[in-house]
Amino acid sequence: MSTNPAIPGDKIAIIEEFETGKNTFDDGQSIRSLVVGTAEFDKANRIAKINESKRLVVPRPGNIIVGNVSALMNNMFAINVMYVEGRPTEAGLEVICQAKGAKKRIMVRVGDIATAKVISLLNGVIHAVINEPDLGVLFTKCNRCAGAVVPMGSNVKCVDCGYIEERKLSLKFGNSDFIKFTSN
Ligand SMILES: [Zn+2]
């Protein structure tokens, strides 16, 4: 998750070590980013700056993102963002989804394509949720044989081996619009 580019408000250095450079400000203690981009440190002149990523679409609270599940932890998971409000984004931003009170449920698996709603950007971490009918898994495969699956209530069933597993499915699961836009 440390591979995320800096987003506005991110702390990139402390003022004892660096001066503010391009696209940064100081809050009295830290140098923070004003834009989305990559931090660069000029150690000779003690200046921290951000090289702005022009082509990066940054999710904001309320935005719907689509991406692939990149990590699964005890009660949270990460989605590597591919689309923000339907617009492709190229830099490896991740959002974190909490799976509160759902420890025993399998919400997603790594590699699933899922859609989530961004709820906050805090200290460089983008938090999102999948607890609405439209949100959740859009595409997944059988966890046992990688075969195609069909939805069955709150589960998916493999058409090849019959394996059944839970998922938090989006109402848009299997939607043909979605298949068209991920095959690009
Ligand atoms: Zn299977």
Image (tube, rainbow, N blue to C red):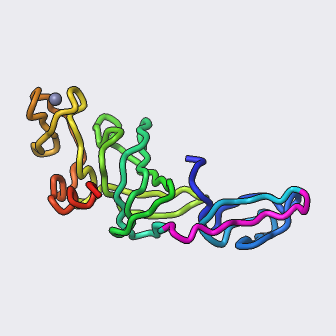
Identity of the residue drawn at 86% across and 56% down: 43
Residue 70, placed above or below residue 159:
below
Residue 122, placed above or below residue 153:
below
Identity of the residue drawn at 17% across and 58% down: 171
Task: Look at the image and say whether residue 37 sits in the magenta stretch.
Answer: no
Q: Which residues are magenta?
A: 44-56
Query: 141 or 71, which is in the foreground?
Result: 141
Identity of the residue drawn at 37% across and 56% down: 129
Where residue 114 appears, as percent x and y from the top left, is: 31, 52
Direction from residue 53 to residue 70 in the image, left or right: left
Direction from residue 61 to residue 12 in the image, left or right: right
Q: Quadrant of residue 130?
A: bottom left
Query: 45 or 114, which is in the foreground?
Result: 45
Image quarter where the C terminus lies is bottom left
Where residue 21 appears, as percent x and y from the top left, is: 79, 70
Q: Quadrant of ligand 1?
A: top left
Residue 162, placed above or below residue 19:
above
Task: Look at the image and say whether residue 54 sits in the magenta stretch.
Answer: yes
Identity of the residue drawn at 39% across and 57% down: 82
Query: 168 or 80, which is in the foreground?
Result: 80
Direction from residue 28 to residue 60 in the image, left or right: left
The number of discs equals 0
Where residue 86 appears, as percent x and y from the top left, is: 33, 68
